[in-house]
Image (cartoon, grey):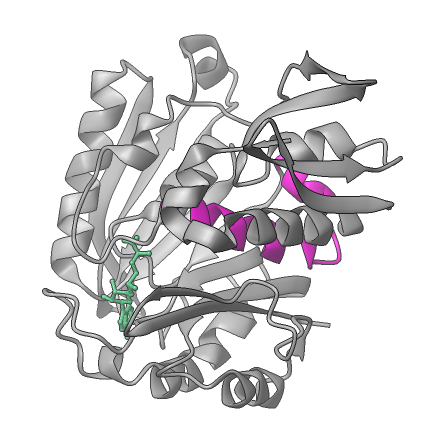
Amino acid sequence: MLVAPSANRVYADAAPRLAAQEAMAVLGAFGSWTAVAPTQVAGVDYLRVESDSEHALDVLSNLSATFAIFAAEGELLRPIPLQRRQFYPDDVVTIQKYQGKTNEQWTRLLLNVTAAATKQPGRWLDGRLDVMDPMCGRGTTLNIALLAGYSVTGVDIDRKDYDTYAAFLKTWAQTHRLKHTMDRGASTTGGRARGREFTLEVAPDKDAFKAGETHTVRYLSTDTTELSGLVRAASIDVIVTDTPYGVQHGSHGDRLSRRPMELIDRALPAWTTTLRTGGAVGLSYNRHVAPADELALLLEQHGLTVVTDIEAAPFRHRVDASIDRDLIVARKD
Ligand SMILES: C[S@@+](CC[C@H](N)C(=O)[O-])C[C@H]1O[C@@H](n2cnc3c(N)ncnc32)[C@H](O)[C@@H]1O
């Protein structure tokens, strides 16, 4: 596997290691692998993978750092067509640029590793995965999930993020002449106002739309600690989110954003209720503001089983002086 050059820009020296760890985590959910190791061919970073899983090509094609795949034949590399789950133009992920945007490649890695930790990882490949980002900002996770054809729900309290993202998504669908509908309105439960929401229903082409083969992006502009009546219980396979980093990100002035542990503690009851049994939560977090052992304990206290090895910390990497980034995945057993 040729590692995407963008991986080096995101993770610097850690790129080959993170690509290898992601491959091991996801291949492990689909059978076996005998070797996964970073290597160099003619001075370029590759990942050498040996696996007899029938899904190996599907898996490798859909990892976050995959640029190209080759079969090793003696000294030579024979290109193999990628089998990517990609239903839409990928500019949906790259067009928006703003302060506080979570890196796209890291978000994809988080989604992949979390889906692989569920009891039904097959949904990641066949598209039946129901994804939720309960603190979705301007939608990086939503865009990645839509691209791969998953149905996705986002929640964020920041009204400006909601408005900006709704406008972006509508314009994007129109620009690409994608057949779609977008319903926008107020969320209410039992007569009580609960914020705003929109649902985009879209299909890659007219025929698919007519046949009802659509994908949906639903976004709720509300407080993530209170989702009852808004998101159906036991309807989500994977919850993935980039938690506030405890550093000021311009517009996000929410009080709890600066205390991520307290926010996660208050939100977990709502989040776990929406999860199916066997589903998983994957959090990206800053070890400087959320100590790994405390976060693991918190997830366990909310009835989840932590599946990430927080000691070995295979995905931990330094972003800058104030962010020591890692992920943690826990399952609802
Ligand atoms: C690190 S940002 C996520 C950025 C997002 N991944 C993106 O790429 O646009 C964390 C988000 O948590 C949201 N947030 C903080 N407290 C919240 C709450 N109580 N309910 C919902 N969202 C909240 C903030 O508004 C912010 O958008």
Q: Is residue 271 above or below residue 58?
A: below
Q: Splitting the image into 4 quarters, where does residue 273 fall?
A: bottom right
Give the magenta-colored segment's residue range: 104-127
Q: Quadrant of ligand 1?
A: bottom left
Residue 114 counted in the magenta span:
yes
Q: Is residue 317 left or right of residue 277?
A: left
Q: Is residue 134 left or right of residue 127?
A: left
Q: Nearer the viewer, residue 98 or 274?
A: 98
Residue plotted at (44% across, 32% down): 147
Residue extending farthest front: 42
Q: Is residue 73 above or below residue 182?
A: above
Q: Is residue 267 left or right of residue 328?
A: left
Q: Splitting the image into 4 quarters, where does residue 157 fall?
A: bottom left
Percent position (x, y) of residue 283? Answer: 48, 67
Q: Is residue 29 above or below residue 296?
A: above
Q: Nearer the viewer, residue 236 or 10?
A: 10
Q: Is residue 115 left or right of residue 254?
A: right
Please identify the dominant SS of the magenta region. Answer: helix
Q: Splitting the image into 4 quarters, where does residue 53 fall?
A: top right
Residue 313 counted in the magenta span:
no
Percent position (x, y) of residue 42? Answer: 59, 26
Residue plotted at (73% across, 28% down): 57
Percent position (x, y) of residue 220? Answer: 30, 56
Q: Nearer the viewer, residue 198 or 189?
A: 198
Q: Can you see residue 37? A: yes
Q: Nearer the viewer, residue 52 or 127?
A: 52
Q: Quadrant of the N terminus?
A: top right
Residue plotted at (22% across, 58% down): 100
Q: Can you see residue 31? A: no
Residue plotted at (39% across, 85% down): 261
Q: Quadrant of the C terminus?
A: bottom right
